Image (cartoon, rainbow, N blue to C red):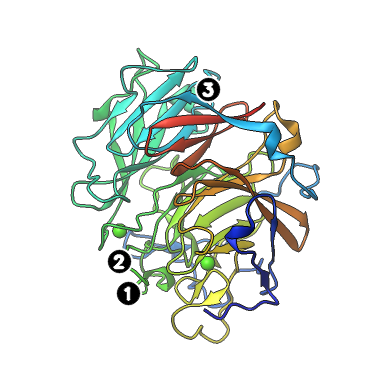
Amino acid sequence: MNNNPARTRLLPATLGLFLSLVVVACIPRVVTPPVSSPPPTTSPSPDAPTVTLTLEPSPTSTDSPYRSDFPDPALYNWSPVVTGLEQPVDIQNAGDGSGRLFVVEKPGRIRIIANWLTLPDPFLDIRDRVGDAGLEQGLLGLAFHPDYAQNGYFYVNYTDVNGDTVIARFQASPDDPNRADPQSELILLQVDQPYANHNGGGLAFGPDGYLYIGLGDGGSAGDPAGNAQNSDTYLGKMLRLDVDTPNAAPEIWASGLRNPWRFSFDSLTGDLYIADVGQNMWEEINFILAGTPGGLNFGWDLFEGMHPFDGQPPAGQVFTSPVAEYSHTEGCSITGGYVYRGAELPEWQRVYFYSDYCTGNVSGMIRADAETWRSTSLFQTGVSVSTFGMDETGEIYFADFGSGMILRLTRR
Ligand SMILES: [Ca+2]
Ligand SMILES: [Ca+2]
């Protein structure tokens, strides 16, 4: 797979815990829009996606983005919070001061954890319109409007009974903060899915107030239709949507993605981390510094991770390479997480947590300096880590898909 040893130094999985995997991104890191981006159009429609090249707000933090090492993981536990949820795939908070966690169950419900207990009645139940036959199908993502406490709006990403992607808004009940009306659905976007897999599924509001939507390449294997590099489809893209303007069309924010399974914004800096699931050999993490214009191309399917995959890149086209990758000797399906920004474990500040669904290893990634990222395996959980989540105070959690358990990082 054309692994260039000058670019990466990969350690075999048998070396076990606590050995650093150092990945230095030497392929030119791109902070300008690709030269071959199509120009923005003035009449966006779902069939003619637009590419937006506006500048994001610059980060306001003066905190250093760098750190040189990790805390000793032996001093920490992942402590069970609740168990018994059904196929949890997302964990979110409403940002409304309630302290609740909202867990997305793949078959089509959202459950509430309050005071360390799962409430018996779901927050939302839309199993009647969710198709979840495939492993990668179902109710997949949730994001709360930044003004949720005032307007009660939240957004979901699911595959419907036809297997197609739906992005929809719902509203919490004005009478009961623990219930939302399934009939309040307002569909904002539908995207045809040619295959059952690679539906992406993540949602997150960016520091610009837009809703970001992660979509996979449509599925099968090897992106047979070339969707991720085709600017005429939303498949294989990161979209962003102005949800506060009625009938606004989504914009293509970034392209060249295979199946982004969990992306998140650093809650302090606004930096964006996108974990993209690999095909045959390489799992990857992409990083976009806050303030970077849209229009980046992350390479799939011309590249898998940092390695050529299928076809010759067009002359003049520039690609943004991942800041970290690992091979299928160490896992098989990345689960992206969050940069820790909580208060209880300040020694974990600036560490980005991620995992691998197949191995259950929870890893951390840090920026050692402007050019160097460092990753290390931290915890061997032995379970299927389907998603991470953060509560309102920035403490970090993950979900075990198999047992339906939610666990929280705590000091021993
Ligand atoms: Ca699909
Ligand atoms: Ca890539």
Q: Label 1, on which residue?
A: 224
Tell me the element at label 1. Answer: loop
Residue type at mark 1: give it: Pro
- Mark 3 and mark 1 in contact? Answer it, CB < 8 Å: no
Q: Relative to the observer, which residue lies in front, 223 or 73? A: 73
Q: Quadrant of the C terminus?
A: top right
* Label 2 CA crowd tier, 10 Å (few <14, some 14–19, many 20+): few
User: Disc number at residue 96?
Assistant: 3
Spatial separation of the CA atoms under disc 1 and disc 2:
7 Å
Q: Relative to the observer, which residue lies in front, 60 or 178? A: 178
Tell me the element at label 2. Answer: loop
Residue 244: quadrant of the picture: top left
User: Disc number at residue 220?
Assistant: 2
Which quadrant of the picture is home to ligand 1? Answer: bottom left
Residue 175: quadrant of the picture: top left
Q: Relative to the observer, which residue lies in front, 53 or 269? A: 269
Relative placement, left or right, of 188 versus 143 is left
Residue 45 x/y as whole percent: 34, 60
- Mark 1 and mark 2 in contact? Answer it, CB < 8 Å: yes
